[in-house]
């Protein structure tokens, strides 16, 4: 049997529910003869009579009743699915769920969300601070709509939109400040360093670069947060190596930011989304604001 046209099934349901081709025609704004022809087409396709026709009524045959119950159950499931989608859409109308790298959350997200709130006072934004690896699972499960953070390798089911290039820099307290205009990786040898720990993407990048150079670092402190690393550096415990974006909005005269002279000591920062995900207007507006805000750093 070839695929049955959905319109034939809809006409069948109307006729079965009303027990009348005429009533089905009135409700669907068609002629009774058109409805009768569609029912006959359906019967020819399934190879069996579905109605017992009388001048007053169109009663279902036993086989017609079987088809009616199956189609009605399927249509109920479809309508339930559509109602659920409408409910989700209504909930999302003023609410945006996002994930953000901790470095960005601490340094840039506050200004972005403050501007967004001024533009959309009734909006609600839920933020999950998480490293990129955990963010991908959140995107896959559609618990968040997009992620703001560094690029992740092997994004088969996701797409990355690069917004800015974010170099690594050294934040130098006065006791370690020799007026350096830049640091090479080898020039950090023997200097007390404050590094992000191996749970972070920045540390993974730094470790690869150091291994390629065949050198080792004197890591006195390892922390998970860039803000903690900067706080320890401010206390004079050593030089910390952090992404530039972590210090871009920081106003601390006690630390001098010095570039690292290595072409690969940088990462791309942007927005990661799940392929095929359809964003609603509020999330689109927030992504647009994020692009504008981050590009101001470039």
Image (cartoon, rainbow, N blue to C red):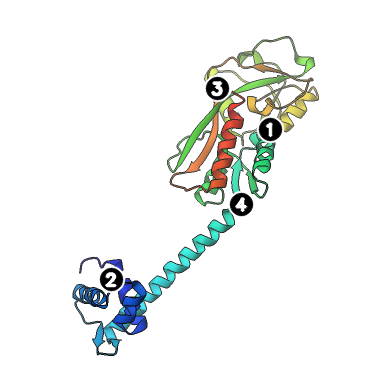
Q: Residue at x 66, y 50 (%)?
A: 122
Nearer to us of marks 3 and 1 is: 1
Label 3, label 1: how many angstroms apart (C-alpha)?
25 Å
The residue tagged 1 is 107
Q: Which x, y percent locates residue 156?
A: 42, 40
Nearer to us of marks 2 and 1 is: 2
Label 2, label 4: how many angstroms apart (C-alpha)?
39 Å
Dot label at residue 209: 3
Closer to us: 281 or 196: 281
Q: Which x, y percent locates residue 249?
A: 70, 27
Q: Residue at x 36, y 75 (%)?
A: 27
Nearer to us of marks 3 and 2 is: 2
Q: Which x, y percent locates residue 139?
A: 52, 47
Q: Quadrant of residue 47?
A: bottom left
Closer to us: 227 or 280: 280
The residue tagged 2 is 8
The residue tagged 4 is 94
Q: Which image quadrant: the N terminus?
A: bottom left
Q: Is residue 189 placed above or below 30 in the rendered structure?
A: above
Graded by Cα atoms within 10 Å as few (under 14), some (14 to 19) or many (20 or more), the crowding at tag 4 reads: some
Q: Are marks 1 and 4 in contact (CB under 8 Å)?
A: no
Q: Which image quadrant: the C terminus?
A: top right
Nearer to us of marks 1 and 4 is: 4
| Mark 4 vs 3, N-terminal side | 4
| Mark 2 vs 1, N-terminal side | 2
Q: Are marks 3 and 1 in contact (CB under 8 Å)?
A: no
Q: Are marks 2 and 4 in contact (CB under 8 Å)?
A: no
| Mark 2 vs 4, N-terminal side | 2
Secondary structure beneath dot 3 equals helix
Label 1, label 4: how many angstroms apart (C-alpha)?
25 Å
């Amino acid at each position: 049997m070839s695929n049955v046209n959905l319109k034939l099934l809809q006409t069948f349901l109307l006729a079965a529910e009303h027990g009348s081709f005429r009533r089905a025609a009135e409700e669907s704004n068609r002629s009774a003869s058109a409805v009768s022809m569609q029912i006959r087409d359906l019967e020819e396709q399934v190879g069996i009579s579905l109605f017992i026709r009388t001048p007053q009524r169109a009663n279902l045959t036993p086989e017609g009743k079987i088809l009616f119950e199956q189609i009605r159950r399927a249509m109920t499931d479809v309508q339930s699915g559509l109602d659920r989608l409408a409910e989700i859409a209504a909930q999302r109308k003023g609410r945006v769920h996002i994930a953000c790298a901790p470095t960005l959350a601490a340094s840039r997200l506050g200004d972005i969300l403050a501007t967004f709130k001024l533009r959309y006072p009734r909006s609600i934004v839920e933020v999950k601070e998480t490293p990129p690896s955990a963010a991908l699972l959140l995107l896959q499960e559609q618990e968040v709509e997009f992620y703001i953070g560094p690029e992740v390798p092997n994004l088969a089911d996701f797409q990355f939109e690069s917004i800015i290039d974010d170099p690594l820099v050294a934040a130098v307290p006065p006791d370690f400040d020799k007026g350096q205009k830049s640091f090479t990786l080898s020039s950090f040898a023997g200097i007390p360093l404050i590094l992000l720990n191996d749970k972070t993407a920045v540390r993974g990048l730094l470790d690869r670069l150091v291994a390629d150079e065949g050198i080792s670092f004197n890591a006195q402190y390892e922390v998970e947060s860039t803000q903690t690393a900067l706080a320890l550096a401010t206390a004079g415990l050593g030089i910390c190596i952090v992404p530039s974006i972590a210090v871009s909005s920081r106003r601390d005269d006690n630390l001098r930011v010095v570039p690292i002279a290595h072409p690969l000591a940088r990462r791309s920062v942007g927005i990661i989304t799940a392929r095929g995900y359809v964003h609603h207007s509020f999330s689109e507006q927030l992504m647009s604001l994020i692009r504008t805000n981050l590009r101001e750093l470039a």
